[in-house]
Image (tube, helix red, strand yellow):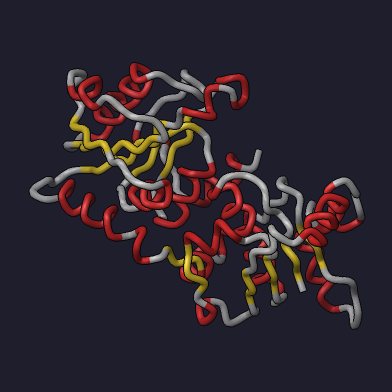
Amino acid sequence: MIYVLQGDGQMCNRIVYFVNALAVAIEFGQDIKHLFADEIVKFTNGVPEAIPECHVTLRNHKGSKLLNYAYGKLWRFDCVTRRYYERNPERIASYRKRKWVLPLILWNWCFRFNEGIVRHREKICAFLRVKPQYETRPRQLLEKVRAGFDGIVVGVHIRRGDYKAFRGGSLYYDDEQYLKWMKEFSASAMRPVRFVIVSNESVDASVFASGGCDVVVASGLPQEDVITLSRCDYIMGPASTFSWWAAYYGDKPRLAMESRNDSASIRNFNKVEALVSRFSS
C-alpha cells in the first residue's frame, strides 16, 4: 500500500505530485491512497476501471486534526522512505516482494518517477478525467477559434500574480517579452498561427494584436484555463506545473521559458518525453 500525504501547493502542484505517485502504483501493482486529495477530487473524476493494476482511493482529510498533526511530524522526519524509496522508485519492486512491510509513505515534493509517468500517461489521464463542467467552455472556445481557420493554435500561459516574487521574479515576463516569443513562433511555423492566451491576471489583447499577432484571450476558472491550454496544438509559457499538466493531459508539445533569452522557435517544443527531465531538474 502507498499513502500519499502531499497536500500543499496549488491545484496543479498537487496533481503533478500525485501523477508521479500514481505512476509508481501502476508500475509495481501497489494500491494507493491519497489522504489530502481535495483539489484533485474537485477537478477530476476518478475512473477506477482505467487502472486495473491497482486500487486508488482519493480522500480529503484536511480537516482531521490527527492526520494533520501526523503529517507535520512526518514532514520533519527524514526517514528511510524519503531518503531511499523516493529517490529510487525502482526499488519499490523489491519492496513489493516482501511478505510484510510497513506502508510506503510519499510526501516529499521532489519525488519524481519520470519513466513511469511517460509509460503510463494514457492510464493516468484516463483515471484523472476532468469533470464535465470544466470542459464545456474550453471546448466551445476552441471550436470558435478553429472555425474557418486552417492553421496552428498555440496556447500561451501568461503567469503573473505569484510569479512576481517566485524565484525572485525571474519567470515574471512583461507583454513585450511574450509578444517577442509569439512572433518568433509565427516566423518559424511557416503556417498561419492563432494564439489563445490564458492568465491569472487580466490581459490587454490589443498589445498583441497591434504587434501583428492573431490573439484570443480566454477568461475562465483555473480548471477551465488548463483544459483550454490542453486543447491547443502547442503550449508555451514560463516553467510551471500549470502548463506542464495541460501538456501532459492533452499530449501536446510544450515549451517552458526559463529565461528571456529562450527561443520560441517551433523546433524547441517537445512532448512529455522531453518535458519530464527538464521539469524535475
The spot of residue 140 in percent (x, y) is 21, 55
Identify the image quadrant of the N terminus: bottom right
The residue located at (36%, 24%) in the rendering is: 178
Q: Nearer the viewer, residue 27 or 170?
A: 170
> Which image quadrant is residue 105 in?
bottom right
The residue located at (54%, 79%) in the rendering is: 48
Taking 145 as reference, is 48 above or below it?
Answer: below
The residue located at (20%, 22%) in the rendering is: 206
Identify the image quadrant of the C terminus: top right
Residue 88 visible, this angle: no
Residue occupying the far left of the picture = 148
Q: Is residue 137 left or right of residue 257?
A: left
Q: Is residue 98 left or right of residue 138?
A: right
The spot of residue 74 in percent (x, y) is 86, 53
Q: Nearer the viewer, residue 267 or 151?
A: 151
The number of numbered badges drawn on the structure is 0
